[in-house]
Amino acid sequence: MTELLAPAGSVDAMKAAFAAGADAVYIGGERFGARAYAENPDPEQLLEAIDRAHLLGKKVYLTVNTLLTQRELNRQLDAFLRPYYERGLDGVIIQDLGVLRYVREHFPGLSLHISTQAGITGAAGAKQMQRLGASRVVPARELSLEEIRSICEIPGLEVECFIHGALCYCYSGACLLSSMLGGRSGNRGRCAQPCRLAYRVYADPEGKQELPGQKDGYVISPKDLCTIDLLPDLLDAGVQSFKIEGRMKKPEYVAGVTAIYRKYIDLYLQQGREAYRVDPEDRKRLADLFSRSGFTDGYLTRHNDKSMITLQAPPLRTENEPWTEFIREHFIKEQTKREITVAARFHVGEAAALSARVGNIEVSVSGSVCERAQKAPTPPERIVENIKKAGEYPFLVLISEDKCEIDSDLFYPMGAVNELRRQLFAALKDAILNSYRRMDHASTRSVDPFPVCPKPAGDDFTHYAAVVSEQEQWDAVMECGPELSVVYVEPFLLTAQNAELFRRDAEAHNKELRLALPHMMRGNLHAFDRLCKNESVQSICRNGMLARNLEGFLWARETFPGAPVYADHSLYTFQKEAREELSAMGCAEDTVPLELNEAQMSDRGLKGSAWMIYGRVPMMISANCLQKSTHGCKNIPVVYLKDRMGMIFPTRCVCAYCYNIIYNSLPVSMHDEQMKYREQGDLSELRLYFSVEDAAQTRKVLKRFGLLHRISGEPDGVSEEYAFTRGHFKRGVL
């Protein structure tokens, strides 16, 4: 199977996509789609669109790829999805583990596709999603051809890859930039695209020492993806579904891009790699439809590169009128039709009969008895001509001579022929659509549980923990009393030389040392693999590991069986269903997501969860690098991104594992809310995240939380005040 999958931000875009050669479309409804501001159809329009697609032999996948709150999942998801499910919806695209669990249990037979928002970065994560009921995964767009190939080798799992359109700077699903800056969450389908604005990069936190090579400053705005030259490689790798991005785009864009990729997919499938040549005019047509300062082939052949980023303001585009007019004439105005084979039998003395076949569906109708002509016979060619008139039905009628038996001496009224044809097409329509209908709601899916991962003794009461990124943060944390009993160390702080020193220091201060895993675990983190061969690091891992993505979680469970694995806030658990799904996979403890407000936290339940009470929110995790995109790799651990409002966002360049973490300008601080939750006793861990703080700042925070009674070297009475935000604790997100 090779599928060309086009975006449909509207019903008109869907029609244009099918006319241009798409095999399937992905479309959003009125709720729960990652493009809330597209011209998404209302329920009746979407039901009609599903029927129209099925009459054409095409497929429709519904985007349910946002994170749902507990109340949304309990009260709205079933009523939203069930009409489309019963109509014959072909699949749903999902990010949320809780939604995956719910749909798997309540909508049997519905194909489950894992969105790129889920951040699948390797074969282990893809296999686990298959195990949880998914038939298809859309891997992270940061993967190389070889990484994609390894996922394609999983038996029975379909792989869908983006081949054209906008790229995110951040790993999809790991971006909180729009959420934190304006309350419009990308995880909720309302991204305001602040990455497309201009920023400057500095070497100092005051924003005075600017890094060279920034041009107009569009340093976190990637160019648009175009893989037209790499289609043979993707096909050879085993990709089955080729996905075009663009649900916010007009029908002309959808049709134009779809038509060109249809042409070249077919060229390769019919003539092979040797005949594969891309016409430069087709590249120009793609650019004329839309591009940001030219195209990039993304991460397929490189880990990151300056050439992938816009950097300077995109030039104004002039419309290619001849190409646009061609699209309108051939794909917008013309209606797509599906070939059907019709057989006709008109014999004197017998009832007239028609039958139609499409795929494995065949229907027949019969009319009145054919009479011998008394005067002028009815011309057979006129009967055939009338049978071919499909009218309102999207059918292209084919009648072969061996399936057309019409006596030359009969008389049959044309009105009767037309009525018989209408009955035939109505019966065929009903048969096609009925073949998709679902009414059986009994669940038939089950998932084998993971081996149980017991929580360490003492995890049933609320304790404090800290995540440290620098040696001076570590030193400050070691001054805390027994209330702060757990420390997670970032892997880029550890080396084979110092790991044992950290382990002994933690032991001397009566603190349990655990390892925080890289924010994006992938198969290419060879430096991390080497680090974990160290015996001291392995000892730290056996104490417990903090997983930031699914690949990291599964790596920890497989590499250190029996060791507790804790899910960080980036492994989203917006509701108890997601928590249960993670727990069934062996999660020792989840973390409250950062986008929930106080009421939503309560709705999901807090028993056994950790909660971030201090820290700069990681707003972007990027495979691209601010240093490399400007003045080249200089191994500067922290650079600073400055926006047009003067806000400065510290950015850690994790050079050992080649990714960036862009932090919020202010830390979240719950110093005035923590005691309420500690006294309730539901939360198992109150966690402080230290990212770019120096020793003095770290001690100031620890004192504010009552974990240091006095800042070393300063007299009593020194203020512990610092600028902070409460994030979404009160306001929530859209």
Image (tube, rainbow, N blue to C red):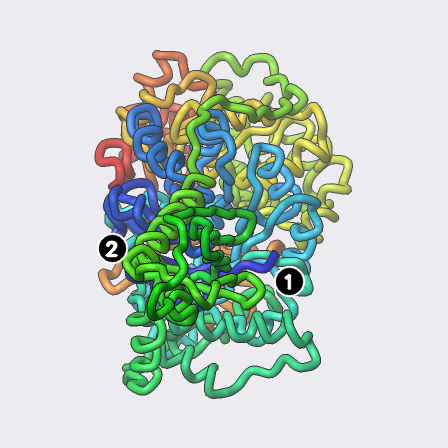
Task: Give percent across and percent down for residue 358.
Answer: 51, 54
- In three-dimensional space, the C-alpha distance between marks 2 and 1, rounded to whole angstroms, equals 34 Å
Three-letter amino acid code of the residue under disc 1: Leu
Q: Quadrant of residue 385?
A: bottom left
Please report the residue visible at 62 percent of the width from the left and 28 percent of the height from the top.
544
In-image side of 407 versus 374 (left or right): right
In-image side of 666 versus 694 (left or right): left
Please report the residue visible at 48 percent of the width from the left and 63 percent of the height from the top.
406
Q: Quadrant of residue 323?
A: bottom left
Residue at mark 2: 39
Task: Give percent across and percent down for residue 17.
Answer: 39, 64
Residue at mark 1: 145
Mark 2 surroundings: few (<14), some (14-19) or many (≥20) residues within 10 A: many
- Tally of marks: 2
In-image side of 7 versus 479 (left or right): left
| Mark 2–mark 1 CB contact (< 8 Å) | no
Q: Nearer the viewer, residue 287 or 664?
A: 287
Please report the residue visible at 66 percent of the width from the left and 38 percent of the height from the top.
555
The secondary structure type at the circle numbered 1 is: helix
Residue 176 seen in the figure = no
Q: Is residue 293 above or below residue 58?
A: below
- Residue found at the far front of this picture: 374
> Which tag, 2 or 1, sits closer to the chain's start?
2
